[in-house]
Image (cartoon, grey):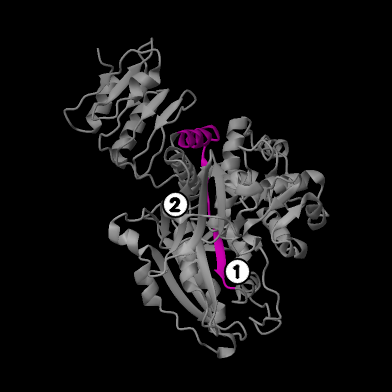
C-alpha cells in the first residue's frame, strides 16, 4: 500500500502522473536517480519510511517545490537521495534533516538563490553547500563585491582608487604625467565600506583592484578579471590611443560565467586640466556589446568639482545592483574569512594546517571540522579570487596564499628583472634568488611552481638543469630552419578576438616537445616533434580581415601526423576551457581545389 506522504506529494503537481516505487536494487542511487524522463519515483527503507524521491522533469515551480519541502519536513523525512532536476525552480531551499542525504541532483533548474560559484561546480558542490547551511543552522547574506579598475598606464586608475578611499586626497602632480610611475602588477585595497542605504545599518564592503596596464601584465589578466564584479574602465581623455576595443573585448570574454550574464561597466573619461581629445562613442559600444550595462562619466581629478564628488556615489550605486549581492552563505564562512583577512595583514601565506585550524575554532558552539568542508570553503574563496589555493598540486596543496597580490607582484618582479629581460626570458634558480632575495627557499620553490605549466603558465624548464624560459620575453624573430610547406597538414584556429598571451601559454604546454633540443621557439611560435613528425605552430594575422589566428602545420607520415595534430588541438582547447570559457573561434582547413592550391 502506498504511504500517505506519497499521496500528499502527488497532489502537489495536480496531474494524473503518480509516483511509483523505484526498482529494488542494492544501490539506491542507481535504482532511484537514474530515471530522467517524466517518471517520478520514490524509495522506502525496510521500515517503510521514504528515503528517496525523484521528481525530475515534472515542471515544478517554486511554490510547488516549497509544498513538497513542507510535506517532507512535517513528516520528519530523512532523505538519502533526492532528484529535483529539470524543473522550473528558481529558489531552491533543501528540506531540513540532511544528515543522511548522499545524492542530490538539481541541475537544469534556473536557480537564483545559490552562489554562481557553487552552481557551476555541479550537484556535489551544491549538496556540500546546503549541508553546511543545515549544520550551521542558517546563513549570513553577502554584501560584498569586487571593483576592478582597468585601463592604459597613466589613465588615472590609482588616483581614482585613492579618491574613493579618501575624498580629500590631492593629486600631487598632473595626473597622467609620464614622470609619475604607473602601477606595476596589482594594487588591492580591501575594506572600502559604505552604507547599504534605505535606513539599514548594513554596511557594503568593496574590494578595489587597480590593475597595471603594461603589456607584460596581460598574461595574468585571466586570473583576476572575473565575473560578478563592477568594471571601471579609466581613460585619459587627452589621448587618442585608449585601446577601448581591447578592454571591452577582454572584459566581455572574462567578465561572465554564462553567455547570458550581464556585465556592468563604468567608463570614466579623465579630462585632465579640461583638455579632451577622446570621443568615446557610448552608443557604438552599447550596440556592439548588448550583454553589457555600459555607463559613462567624465571627471577631472585635477580640480575639485561636483563630478569628482559624485563619481563615488555612482560607483556605490552600481556595486549595490550586482546580481549576487545578498547571496546567502553558511554562517561560519563569514567569520572564518574575516579571521583570514586579519591573518594576512601579518603574513601573505599560511599552510593548509593553519587554514584548517582557523576553520576548527569554536564559534558559538559551531565548528568547521571536516577536512572536506574546509577544502570546499578554500575552493570557494579561491574561485572568488580572495586567496589562491591549488589543492590538486602536491607541491602547492600546503601553500595557501592569503594575499594574491604578493604572488602576482613576485611573478612580475621576475618578468621585469633587467637581467631576465636582457637574456630574452631565460633565467636560472640563481636569478630567482636575486629577484626573491627576501624569500625563503621554500617560498621560492612554491612561487616557481606557481609560474609553471599547471598554473600561471608563464615559464617552463629547459633541458639545462635549473634553467627556465618565459616565452613572452623571447625574441620576435623566427629562427632559421628547413620547412617544406607544400606537403604539410594544415589547420587554423581563427579568433575574432585572441586574448594576449595565449600563444605563450601554448608554448609552455608544448615545451617538452620543442624541436632541436628546445631551440626552435620564439615569442610567437614554436616547432615541436613527436614520433618522427614535426609541427609548426605560430600566431599570425590574416591579411584581408586582420583576424588573429593560430596556424598549425604538421609534416610527417600521414598516419602519425594526425595524432600530433590532435595533441596540439587538445592543448589549445584545454587553455580555452581553463581560462577563456566564452572564447569564440573557428577551426579552419585550407581549400584543396585546384584553383586555391594554384593561388596559395
Label 1 sits on a secondary structure element that is: loop
Q: Is residue 209 left or right of 318 when viewed as pictured?
A: right
The stretch drawn in magenta includes residue 142: yes
**159, above or below 231, in the image:** below
Residue 134 sits above or below residue 186 on the image = above
- Residue drawn where x is 30% and y is 40% of the image: 63
State the mark number for residue 213. Answer: 1
Q: Quadrant of the N terminus?
A: top left
* Res. 197 visible in picture: no
> Residue 581, image x and y in percent?
45, 51
Residue, disc 2: 257
Looking at the image, how many numbered discs can be counted on the residues? 2
Q: Which residues, given as a range, are shown in magenta?
A: 124-152
Front-most of 493 and 334?
A: 493
* Residue 63 in sight from this viewpoint: yes
Looking at the rendered image, the disc whose residue lies closer to the viewer, 2 or 1, is 1
Amino acid at each position: 500500500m502506498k504511504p500517505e506522504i506519497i499521496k500528499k506529494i502527488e497532489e502537489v503537481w495536480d496531474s494524473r502522473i503518480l509516483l511509483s516505487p523505484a526498482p529494488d536494487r542494492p544501490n539506491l542511487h542507481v535504482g532511484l536517480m537514474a530515471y530522467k524522463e517524466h517518471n517520478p519515483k520514490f524509495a522506502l527503507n525496510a521500515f517503510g519510511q521514504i528515503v528517496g524521491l525523484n521528481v525530475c522533469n515534472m515542471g515544478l515551480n517554486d511554490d510547488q517545490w516549497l509544498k513538497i519541502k513542507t510535506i517532507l519536513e512535517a513528516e520528519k523525512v530523512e532523505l538519502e537521495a533526492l532528484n529535483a532536476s529539470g524543473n522550473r525552480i528558481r529558489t531552491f531551499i533543501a528540506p531540513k534533516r540532511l544528515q543522511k542525504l548522499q545524492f542530490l541532483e538539481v541541475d537544469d533548474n534556473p536557480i537564483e538563490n545559490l552562489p554562481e560559484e557553487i552552481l557551476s561546480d555541479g550537484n556535489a558542490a551544491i549538496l556540500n553547500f546546503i549541508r553546511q547551511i543545515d549544520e550551521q543552522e542558517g546563513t549570513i547574506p553577502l554584501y560584498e563585491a569586487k571593483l576592478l579598475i582597468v585601463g592604459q598606464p597613466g589613465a588615472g586608475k590609482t588616483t581614482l582608487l585613492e579618491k574613493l578611499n579618501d575624498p580629500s586626497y590631492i593629486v600631487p602632480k598632473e595626473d597622467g604625467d609620464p614622470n609619475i610611475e604607473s602601477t606595476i602588477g596589482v594594487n588591492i585595497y580591501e575594506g572600502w565600506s559604505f552604507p547599504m542605504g534605505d535606513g539599514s545599518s548594513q554596511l557594503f564592503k568593496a574590494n578595489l583592484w587597480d590593475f597595471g596596464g603594461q603589456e607584460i601584465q596581460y598574461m595574468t589578466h585571466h586570473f583576476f578579471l572575473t565575473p560578478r564584479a563592477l568594471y571601471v574602465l579609466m581613460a585619459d581623455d587627452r589621448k587618442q590611443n585608449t585601446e577601448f576595443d581591447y578592454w571591452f573585448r577582454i572584459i566581455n570574454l572574462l567578465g561572465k560565467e554564462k553567455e547570458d550574464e550581464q556585465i556592468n561597466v563604468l567608463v570614466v573619461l579623465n579630462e585632465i586640466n579640461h583638455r579632451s581629445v577622446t570621443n568615446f562613442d557610448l552608443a557604438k559600444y552599447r550596440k556592439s556589446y548588448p550583454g553589457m550595462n555600459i555607463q559613462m562619466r567624465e571627471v577631472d581629478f585635477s580640480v575639485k568639482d561636483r563630478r569628482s564628488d559624485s563619481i563615488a556615489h555612482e560607483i556605490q550605486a552600481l556595486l549595490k545592483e550586482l546580481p549576487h549581492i545578498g547571496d546567502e552563505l553558511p554562517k561560519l564562512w563569514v567569520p572564518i574569512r574575516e579571521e583570514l583577512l586579519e591573518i594576512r595583514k601579518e603574513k601573505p601565506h599560511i599552510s593548509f594546517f593553519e587554514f584548517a585550524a582557523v576553520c576548527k575554532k569554536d564559534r558559538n558552539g559551531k565548528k568547521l571540522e571536516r577536512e572536506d568542508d574546509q577544502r570546499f570553503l578554500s575552493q570557494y574563496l579561491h574561485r572568488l579570487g580572495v586567496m589562491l589555493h591549488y589543492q590538486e598540486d602536491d607541491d602547492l596543496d600546503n601553500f595557501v596564499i592569503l594575499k594574491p597580490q604578493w604572488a602576482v607582484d613576485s611573478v612580475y618582479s621576475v618578468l621585469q628583472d633587467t637581467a631576465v629581460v636582457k637574456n630574452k626570458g631565460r633565467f636560472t634558480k640563481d636569478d630567482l634568488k636575486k629577484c626573491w632575495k627576501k624569500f625563503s627557499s621554500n617560498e621560492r620553490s612554491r612561487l616557481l611552481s606557481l609560474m609553471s605549466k599547471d598554473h600561471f603558465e608563464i615559464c617552463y624548464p629547459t633541458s639545462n638543469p635549473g634553467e627556465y624560459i618565459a616565452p613572452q620575453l623571447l625574441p620576435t624573430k623566427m629562427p632559421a630552419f628547413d620547412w617544406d610547406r607544400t606537403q604539410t597538414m594544415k589547420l587554423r584556429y581563427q579568433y575574432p578576438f585572441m586574448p594576449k598571451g595565449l600563444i605563450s601559454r601554448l608554448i609552455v604546454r608544448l615545451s617538452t616537445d620543442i624541436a632541436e633540443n628546445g631551440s626552435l621557439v620564439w615569442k610567437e611560435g614554436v616547432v615541436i616533434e613527436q614520433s618522427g613528425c614535426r609541427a609548426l605552430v605560430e600566431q599570425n594575422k590574416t591579411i584581408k580581415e586582420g583576424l588573429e589566428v593560430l596556424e598549425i602545420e604538421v609534416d610527417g607520415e600521414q598516419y602519425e601526423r594526425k595524432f600530433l595534430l590532435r595533441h596540439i588541438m587538445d592543448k589549445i582547447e584545454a587553455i580555452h576551457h581553463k581560462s577563456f570559457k566564452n572564447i569564440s573561434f573557428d577551426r579552419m582547413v585550407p581549400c584543396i581545389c585546384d584553383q586555391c592550391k594554384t593561388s596559395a
